[in-house]
Amino acid sequence: MSEILVVNAGSTSLKLHAVDEQEEAVALESFADAPAGVVAVAHRVVHGGARFVDPVLIDATVRQQISELIALAPLHNAPAFAALEAAQKALPDVPHIAVFDTAFHRTLAYEASVYPLPPRWREEWGIRRFGFHGLSVEWCAGRVPEIVGGPVARLVVCHLGGGSSVTAVVGGRSVDTTMGFTPLEGVPMTTRSGSIDPGAILYVLRNHALDADALDHELNFESGLKGLAGGSGEMRELERRVAEGDRAAGLALDVFVHRLAGAVAAMAAAAGGFDALAFTAGIGEHSALVRERLCGRLVFLGVEMDRRENAEAEPDCDVSVAGSAVRILVVRAREELVAARAARRLLASGRHS
């Protein structure tokens, strides 16, 4: 049986799955565990820039171009490139295919992707909004109609994990999303700041002796929920501390939910309303508290949650009350299946040879 080995290198983890033709996925510990039937390796690459909008066979030219994109997303593309090198060494005789998180967002409306910046920034330097978590959002766009038993024209997806984003999907296509030129923009995350006033960055650079590298580190590793609450910033830790009455953890959770509510409302506006709201990834799938608090702020948009169903939720399920104008879904993230499907389509097309 032919299998696709999917390599998903995140900023803090490396996940390997062997996916067979029936889309049964088996997690692996290392490249040495890859089954003999592997016919291709699919690599999730977070940032494809403007160049990569489709899956592509990795040759020497593509490999070089991917390495050049590390500057746009060093926390994600650097480990992905390292994993690519290791995988090509371990499995040199099969095609290696790159699948890009940014590609799903190639359909963003121009007004959603353009920044109000000088022409030189936009046209010469290529600074625009790209969007991320595309494989996860693409999976939700296909999975939600299966769960609810019918088409969903307007969907808002909350991918909530170590990195978090909210995306508006209309007719299966991304029309707006919270992440931008890099995965640092948008809602607060575990250790990332999300969107802040750029004037604050200028102020710090001018008055507090931080250079670009130090600023990069503090915005990516010392901010977000960690910056507000201390500790790791991980949601399970925050929830425990909130239950114990920890005020800093309570503030972090409040800020997270507040910003998420604004993001969901903005995405609903971009979609012209919404018919379903999907939660996915680590926090989205496992934090009933975040889901409950967020949906409590969205009742005015027709979001009505069944609190008991939510408390007991196991993906994939519907946790909205009967008659809710907006269906509320908890969806298991399956990025490995989206990547494997993309690789199989490329193999079937013959464009890999």
Image (tube, grey):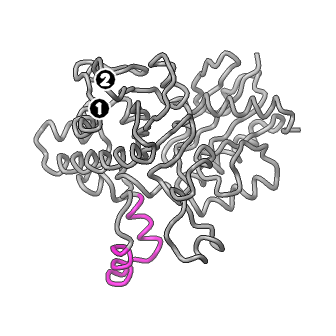
Look at the numbered disc 2 and give the secondary structure of its residue.
Answer: loop
- Magenta stretch? 199-220
Q: Secondary structure at mark 1?
A: loop
Q: Is residue 280 left or right of residue 25?
A: left
Residue linked to disc 1: 303
Q: Residue at x 23, y 52 (%)?
A: 229
Give whichever of 88, 157 is nearer the camera.
Answer: 157
Q: Residue at x 39, y 47 (%)?
A: 269
Specify whether residue 217 is painted magenta.
yes
Location of mark 2 (residue): 320
> 35 or 63: which is nearer to us?
63
- The answer to whether residue 159 is above or below residue 334 is below
Residue 11 drawn above or below residue 219 = above
For the view shown, which residue lies furthest in the right direction?
353
Disc 1: CA contacts within 10 A as few (<14), some (14-19) or many (>=20): many
Identify the residue at horizontal 37%, vertical 52% (top origin).
187
Q: Is residue 114 left or right of residue 186?
A: right
- Picture quarter with the C terminus: top right
Q: Is 309 placed above or below 141 here?
A: above
Of labels 2 and 1, earlier in sequence is: 1
Question: What residue is drawn where x is 18% and y is 41%?
Answer: 241
Residues tagged 2 and 1 counted as in contact (Cβ below 8 A)? yes
Say what amino acid the circle numbered 2 marks: Ser
x and y, in percent, of residue 313 in the image? 33, 20
